[in-house]
Amino acid sequence: MDYRRCKVFHHCCSIKAECVMWSLIDRKMQLTLIVVLTVSVLLGLQSITELATGEPFSLFKLVSACVFLIGTLFVLIFNLTWRWLWRKLPLLNRAFFPDLNGVWVGELKSTWINPETGQSPGPIASRITIRQGLFDISIKQKTGESNSFSLKVIAEAEPSADRYRLWYSYSNRPKAEFAYRSADHDGIAWLEVNIGDDPDLLEGQYFTARRTTGDLSIRRHSDIK
């Protein structure tokens, strides 16, 4: 991926952030769900208000109120239990998007050339924590010299190719002792998993605003609650 594509992705991220599962739904279906949910919410709230004030209401509004309450409860429960469902039905990992929650450890290899030595630094130990939900996701990375956190994350799934990727923009903050040679900066990165090959291995690349690049290779070390 070249820097032009990085800029395009960064522009898209600056406009909106998409939910992990929501972004994988067809646009036409998204619009349909938004319209149906909006109408249900409005009718449901109106019915609840009329019921609370003792005003007469129709059977249709009563049904709308029930749908609203049941739907809200379902979303809340599903958001709390989806990981359990994904473990019980592994096919969901392929059909939608895999559960990548966890602490991942590995290394990054930078292509940056030290002007003093004329060489690239060796592999840098890296620890990445991914917190994934149905409606949001965050990525944090720690190395011996800096910490970074995601700003926007977009999920991309290609089930037919067994390829699942997270694109994200991030902000990096070096530790004080290294600030003299490494300034704060932003960047773009992607991490990809092939479930059929190794569901606990993520590999990818990063691109920084300083026009440096590098490779990432991390393995799931532990789960998170």
Image (tube, grey):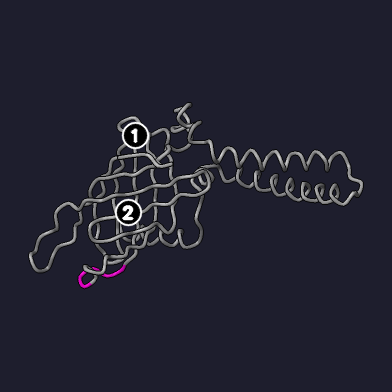
In this rendering, the label closer to the viewer, 2 or 1: 2
Q: Main secondary structure of the magenta part?
A: loop
Q: Is residue 99 above or below residue 139?
A: above
Q: Secondary structure at mark 2?
A: strand
What span is colored magenta in the figure?
A: 180-184
Q: What mark, if any, has residue 107 been given in the picture?
A: none
Q: Residues within 10 Å of mark 1 (few under 14, many from 20)?
A: some
The image quarter in which residue 151 lies: bottom left
* Left or right of 58 on screen, residue 150: left
Q: Residue 113, percent across and down?
A: 15, 62
164 part of magenta stretch: no
Label drawn at residue 199: 1
Task: Tell me what residue is drawn at x 20 percent, y 70 percent.
Answer: 181
Q: Position of residue 101 (x, y in %)?
A: 40, 42
Q: Residue at x 85, y 47 (%)?
A: 51
Q: Amino acid at mark 1?
A: Pro
**Can you give x and y, in whole percent of width and height, for residue 128 in the image?**
32, 49
**Residue 125 position within the rendered picture, expressed as x and y whole percent measured from the top left:** 21, 51
The answer to whether residue 211 is left or right of residue 90 is: left
